[in-house]
């Protein structure tokens, strides 16, 4: 493996820079680098490896499917994609239609095309999104991305997108009129630093969209599939976030996995206050295999006519089987409850650290940011790595933790116990 970083640098475009570590393998929440050093993985490939590494359910589902039938294209349908679409709709209370893609940005491209089609049919000419929001890197998703430094070098995009401050319902109300086609928002801004909106924001978003007829598109690419302790982060707006763990565990053991059919009608009624018209998913859905989904509810699910959209690989049997294994395992193993309890332990442990570099902790479930008092995140990330923990400096002053949903309380504790000395090492400048 010698010189792998140098060879990477020579062979790849310079868009990523050269990552600090070459990983060789993983097991559960642990990974090993090419030199054989072990790390606790608290970032999970950016909130993707929801079951950790090498989970037997994922390995078995993917291996069996790749052996049986790996690809069909959309010239033919197959059972795993149908089961997955049905399962996602069940979790959402039904009443929707699904499109399967390969990534987050593609899920948003689908949502954007729905919004444009809806806009053209109804004289709605522009879209509203949030400052500092992140929706992906393809040209359409990039047009929606609120961070000017990554958007503007590639504009203009030919789509009228207006940006409002995130979390400000009055600003949104002022920006969304009768000729607005859609509002794209993250339930909490991930790449901006795991920044949650004020309580009640999404109920206000829902109201504004209802009043004007603009589509409410929730980009749950990072926040869904158990990351915050509920299947979808928008569910928190309903005030049910305090009890999802016990409920889901109880249901999983009582009814088993395969037989579980959620009470669709009751669920959709309780969700209505913040339920989006269009929802996009990706990251944690495939547990490491590339899959994205765009789900549109009610009549919006029927906006596309035959031929309006497509993907050769989207929803291929292997990725669909992986996503089904992820959903089944989260249910069966009570991982929503685990995300709540271990996430709270992680936040409490970090919050109890008294250190001049640490300003606070924000986020929900197993999606947290440690906020620093200055631009020390790269130094702290490096010090954590030296101490055997992988975390992510996502802003100059914010570190992200988005570990596998299987993280144990003991593993979280091992990190929070080590955190003071990691901060000391970063402060002393040992790590630059
Ligand atoms: C990661 C992310 C995307 C883009 O997903 P890709 O799979 O990298 O294309 C879009 N929106 C949000 C909120 C994300 O976190």
Image (cartoon, rainbow, N blue to C red):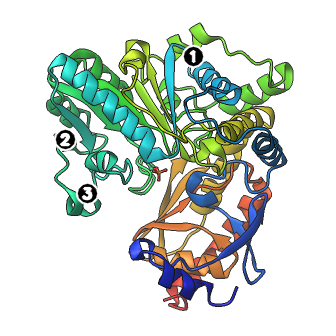
Query: Residue 109's quadrant in the figure?
Result: top left
Report if residue 41 is visible in the image. Answer: yes
* Pointer 2 residue Cβ closer than 8 Å to ligand 1: no
Q: Please state which of the two labelled residues, at mark 2 or mark 1, is closer to the viewer.
A: 2
Q: Residue furthest top?
A: 265
For marks 3 and 2 on the same chain, the one whose residue lies earlier in the sequence? 3
Residue that mark 2 sits on: 159
Asked whether 49 or 311 is in front, the reply is: 311
The Cα–Cα distance between marks 1 and 3, rounded to whole angstroms, is: 35 Å
Q: Which residue is drawn at 32% across and 36% down?
A: 184
Q: Residue 151 carries which label?
A: 3
Asked whether 331 or 2 is in front, the reply is: 2
Report if residue 186 is visible in the image. Answer: no
Residue that mark 1 sits on: 93
Asked whether 429 or 298 is in front, the reply is: 298
Query: Residue 391's quadrant in the figure?
Result: bottom right
Location of residue 393 with respect to 8 vertically, above or below: above
């Amino acid at each position: 493996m010698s010189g792998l970083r140098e060879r990477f640098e020579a062979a790849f475009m310079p868009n990523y820079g050269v990552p600090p570590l070459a990983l060789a393998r993983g097991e559960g929440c642990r990974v090993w680098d090419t030199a054989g050093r072990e790390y606790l993985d608290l970032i999970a490939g950016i909130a993707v490896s929801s079951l950790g590494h090498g989970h037997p359910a994922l390995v078995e589902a993917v291996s069996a499917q790749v052996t049986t039938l790996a690809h069909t294209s959309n010239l033919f349908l197959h059972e795993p994609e149908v089961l997955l679409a049905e399962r996602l709709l069940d979790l959402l209370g039904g009443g929707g239609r699904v499109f399967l893609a390969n990534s987050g940005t593609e899920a948003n491209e689908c949502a954007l095309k729905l919004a444009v089609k809806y806009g053209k049919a109804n004289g709605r000419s522009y879209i509203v999104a949030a400052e500092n929001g992140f929706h992906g890197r393809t040209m359409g998703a990039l047009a929606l991305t609120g961070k000017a430094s990554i958007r503007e070098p590639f504009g203009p995009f030919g789509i009228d997108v207006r940006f409002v401050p995130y979390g400000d319902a009055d600003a949104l109300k002022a920006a969304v009129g009768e000729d607005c086609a859609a509002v794209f928002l993250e339930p909490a801004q991930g790449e901006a630093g795991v920044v949650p909106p004020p309580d009640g924001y999404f109920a206000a978003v829902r109201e504004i969209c209802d009043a004007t007829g603009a589509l409410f598109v929730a980009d749950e690419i990072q926040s869904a599939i158990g990351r915050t302790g509920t299947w979808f982060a928008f569910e928190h707006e309903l005030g049910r976030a305090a009890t999802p763990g016990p409920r889901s565990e109880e249901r999983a053991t009582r009814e088993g996995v395969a037989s579980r059919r959620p009470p669709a009608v009751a669920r959709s009624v309780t969700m209505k206050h913040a339920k989006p018209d269009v929802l996009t998913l990706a990251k944690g859905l495939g547990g490491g295999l590339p899959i994205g989904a765009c789900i549109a509810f009610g009549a919006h699910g029927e906006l596309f006519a035959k031929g309006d959209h497509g993907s050769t690989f989207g929803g291929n049997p292997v990725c669909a089987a992986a996503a089904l294994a992820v959903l089944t395992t989260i249910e069966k193993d009570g991982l929503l409850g685990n995300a709540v309890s271990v996430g709270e332990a992680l936040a409490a442990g970090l919050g109890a650290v008294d250190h001049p570099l640490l300003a606070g902790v924000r986020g929900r479930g197993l999606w947290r940011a440690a906020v620093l008092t200055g631009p020390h995140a790269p130094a702290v990330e490096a010090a954590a790595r030296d101490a055997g923990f992988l975390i992510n400096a996502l802003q100059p002053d914010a570190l992200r933790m988005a570990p596998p949903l299987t993280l144990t309380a003991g593993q979280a504790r091992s990190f929070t116990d080590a955190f003071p000395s990691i901060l000391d090492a970063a402060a002393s400048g040992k790590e630059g």
